Image (cartoon, rainbow, N blue to C red):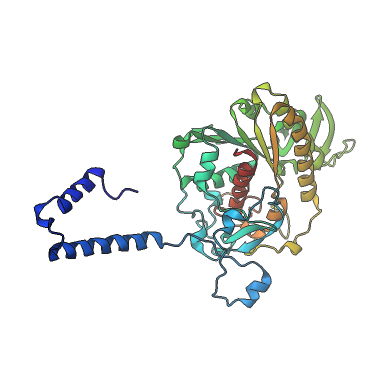
Amino acid sequence: MELCSVQTRKNVHNYLFKGEKFLNLGNPGFLLFYSLFLTMIFTFYMLHFSISPIVNFTTNSKEDDAARPRNSLYMIQPQLLIDNNTSDCDLFNGSWVRNQQKSSLYYTNFSCPTIPHSKNCLLNGRQDEEFMHWKWKPDKCTIPIFNPKTFLAFVKGKTMAFIGDSLARNHMESLLCLLSSEETPMDIYKDAEDKFRTWIFPRYNFTLMVLRTEFLVFATERVINGSFTGGFDLHLDKLNGNWTQHLPNIDYVIFSDGHWFLRPNYLYENDNLIGCIYCGEAGVQHLGPGYAIRRAFQAAFKYINECEECSGIVVLLRTFSAGQFENGAWNEGGFCNRTRPFAREEVKIGDQDWEFRNIQTEEVERARKDGKKIGNNFEIMDVTRAMLMRADGHPGAYWGNKWMKGFSDCIHWCLPGPIDTWNEFLLEIIRRKFST
């Protein structure tokens, strides 16, 4: 940064060296002034260049944690945040390590103005803060810290859309907070139900969208005796056109869906009822949520790969992030009040959540093979294992809902919180796969 203008420097030069007063370089006054001038320059240099880079502090293991005094800090070397990465390192197998410094937060619940009230857990009364101070550490590398300027440079002139359920919105809201420290976004569109929302970052000509669709496919809520039931008729071979119409204008898509399939839904193909999910109705085959999830993503990916105007699109599927209610379901007194992550060995792998994750990864791999032929790119953001360890990161009772007191939110994520890691994954995937 220039400390003074060119004209000002010229004026100083003329005054010091052209004025008759200082033509005699042996003059004591000149020597005194010159010494003071050099001292000022040296002092400025030392102050400017001796500032240490920002680093994160973390504990690496239980053994280290036990051996180290409680008030001590373990410092990750700054160069590891950049240099210790290889393109073949598995980002998604690892563990959570504690980050000791509050200053390492990307943003706070006050510094980001776009945090929705229901995700602002501290504002809603949550007292513990440790859930914000854990960083995901892959086994064989380190994820670089999220740099909003780098992210925006990669997506300059592009459009990115988060398509799916309310967790897609939660993910987008995290990214919005992370990028806001580089440029304040402009909110340019919101539909009547706030299901479709568009923001733009003018300096980078980057458009960020969220397109709400609970099932990806066409769905209508079932009504019995004039009352909505909470169950849906799902047409697994017909996509919801509200989101597909936007695809030709999108460069990056991040899909997220799964939770709405865990309802008493009826499944149709070719307008014929083929089965149901948890309906318990005699004569109707129970097909299970996994079947419907697979068919929905198959339909979505098939449409994209057959869309001539969508050639070159980048599709990322963020795998299933499980609800983590304890002592019952959401409407049976279930809660989530943990304050620390689970260790890796404490997490059970292989339940229904893992089945959904496997289905999603299989369908991405299938779509990737077909997409290569027309220049489409399909990638997986495999968060399932990492988030199974983070039952401490949900709003729980602190989601500020005045109309459903006594119910906990153990599906969505506090902001700031563990969900910010999803955007560290997103940036690293873009850097590895699509930044050239």
Residue in view at x 66 percent, y 54 percent: 410
Q: Seen from this angle, which residue lies furthest top? A: 308
**Can residue 124 be seen?**
yes
Q: Quadrant of the C terminus?
A: top right
Say whether residue 202 is left or right of residue 166.
left
Indicate whether 90 appears above or below 60: above
Tell me the quarter of the picture where residue 319 sits: top right
Q: Which is nearer the eye, 413 or 267?
A: 413
**Can residue 115 be seen?**
no
Q: Seen from this angle, which residue lies furthest left? A: 20
Q: Which is nearer the eye, 211 or 106?
A: 106
Tell me the quarter of the picture where residue 77 sits: bottom right
Instruction: Residue 369: give x, y in percent of width and height.
Output: 77, 33
Instruction: Residue 249: give x, y in percent of width and height.
Output: 58, 27
Residue in view at x 59 percent, y 45 percent: 427
How many badges with numbers are in the image? Answer: 0
Instruction: Residue 299: give x, y in percent of width and height.
Output: 75, 30
Residue in view at x 67 percent, y 68 percent: 61
Q: Which is nearer the eye, 391 or 220?
A: 391
Say whether residue 387 is left or right of residue 38.
right
